[in-house]
Amino acid sequence: MAVVPGQVVQEDAPGGPPDVCALGAYCASYVAPSVGAYRPAQLGGTAGSTNTTVTIFRNGTTQYGIVWYSDIDTDERPSLKNGTYTIRLNVTTTNAVIVWDAFQVCRVNSLCVSQETICGSLFALGKSVGRTGVLSATASGAPTTWNSGDRIMWVLGFKASGFGFPQSFGFTPDQNLNFPPIDDMGRYVYHYRRRRVQ
């Protein structure tokens, strides 16, 4: 797939050795789900095709059900102006008691330690996963300075109504995620870098 500046592609689970990062809240304040999904979303990536299950406790608390990560490499200027971040979610197995409630975009370092919140906490989205199809949400991000080895973490929070046994839904990681592509000199600063073993 061609590289489109300002756009990363959701993918199925990566191969290769274990990642230093994993499913987690990072800069978000969400709690752990019963079963979550940690997936790559990369420049020039190959859209996924696997229906993936997320399981949420029915306790009314926002849980980090999905985390996408995007590798960053800055060859020229390690900075980014403020702009709009867009997250998309393709629901392929429905559940009417679960809603996509929130999302945050975080910057982490090469050790996967959270460094800052880029888009900060967009709550009360209220987007039901009770129907199949693509859901989307946008938020404004702050100006950001990158360091070598940094990643973007796209953290999605979900809620399930009521109490009792966990509830599940399914998604397919085949959508695009968008971020501001240009620095203050009008140049693209995101360059594709893959950390997989071929």
Image: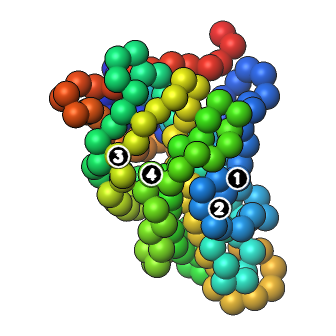
Q: Secondary structure at mark 1?
A: loop
Q: CA distance from mark 3 to mark 2?
A: 24 Å
Whole-percent x, y for residue 168 in the image: 69, 67
Amino acid, disc 1: Gly
* Labelled disc at residue 64: 2
Q: CA distance from mark 4 to mark 3?
A: 8 Å
Q: CA distance from mark 2 to mark 4?
A: 17 Å
Residue where numbered disc 1 is placed: 24
- The tag earlier along the polypeptide, 3 or 1, is 1
Q: CA distance from mark 4 to mark 1?
A: 16 Å
Name which residue lies at 40% across and 42% down: 144
Mark nearer the viewer, 3 or 2:
3
Whole-percent x, y for residue 170 in the image: 61, 58
* Labelled disc at residue 143: 3
Q: CA distance from mark 1 to mark 2?
A: 7 Å
- The tag earlier along the polypeptide, 3 or 2, is 2
Q: Are marks 1 and 2 in contact (CB under 8 Å)?
A: yes
Q: Is residue 171 visible?
A: no
